[in-house]
Image (cartoon, rainbow, N blue to C red):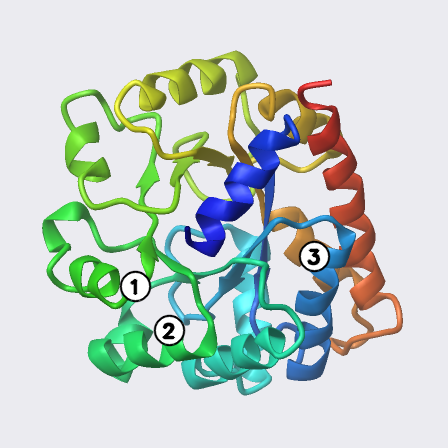
Amino acid sequence: MTRIEKRFAEAKAANRPALVTYVMAGDPDLATSQAIMEALPQAGSDIIEFGMPFSDPMADGVAIQLSGQRALAAGMTLRGVLDMVENFRRKDETTPIVLMGYYNPIYVFGVDGFLAAAKAAGVDGLIIVDLPPEEDDELCIPALKAGLNFIRLTTPTTDDKRLPAVLKNTSGFVYYVSMTGITGAVIKSRGAVGEAVERIKGHTDLPVAVGFGIKTAEDAAEIGKHADGIVVGTVLVDAVGKSLADGKATDKTVAAVRDLVADLASGVKRARG
């Protein structure tokens, strides 16, 4: 059983959805970002989505765009992201880590070299938002062969005809994007999200995690009634940005993220209660 499978199984046994938290690697600087990453499991995060900063993040809203810009300005590279995962693994061997981002940095790094380095560092899975199923030979299939889960996004526009193609080589979990558009928007209909999750579950036995638009413990509790996992990102990277002074980390930066995650974890625990 992989770390991801084990963590979803543990959450299910506890009668709650898993809490998946997204933060950007290297934001606002390497040391602070490492401290944030290490604080996440203590605060209640079940799975860490670690953003790979990229200069043209077309699926992301302003908060995550700014987060990526801060990380790049601080000197973060893809090799640096993997080094941070390796450092994390020296203290935590159980929390799943999923790298999320875009294909260009991986392509430049070299697919085979990246996959080998990611596996060696302790990465569990990948979410690459700009590679559709038609391009599975590019990265998805090699990642699966390397022992990494390849997590695919589904959206409200992914109909029953398209869904089998999207799910074909998906592993670990399915990430349901709760709306059309970019990260950071507001969920318009929680009921529609529940219906979509049930529809996806009719096509797969994989856990379904819902992301985009989840900002509060109340959101987590409501969406968690239907989903196997809750993905939260924008509100966390926004908390980093708001904690800075003149673009630099303060003594409030790590705590701002940690406290938000703890609050979201309390909402997750209430989802089925």
- The three-letter code of the residue at mark 3 reads Pro
Residue at point 27%, 44% (across, down): 170
Residue at point 78%, 56% (across, down): 258
Q: Residue furthest right?
A: 251
Q: Pinpoint residue 254: horizontal percent, then vertical percent.
A: 79, 66
Q: Element under label 2?
A: helix
Of the numbered discs 2 and 1, the one sitting upstream in the chain is 2
Of the numbered discs 3 and 1, the one sitting upstream in the chain is 3
Density class for disc 3 (Cα within 10 Å; few <14, some 14-19, many ≥20) is many
Q: Which residue is mark 3?
A: 41
Please say if the residues under marks 2 and 1 sit with CB atoms less than 8 Å apart. yes
Residue 240 position (above or below residue 83): above
Q: Pinpoint residue 114: horizontal percent, then vertical percent.
A: 30, 78
Q: Element under label 1?
A: loop
Residue at point 66%, 31% (across, down): 14
Q: Element under label 3?
A: helix
Task: Describe residue 158's horizontal placement relative to residue 4 as left or right.
Answer: left
Q: Which residue is mark 2?
A: 119
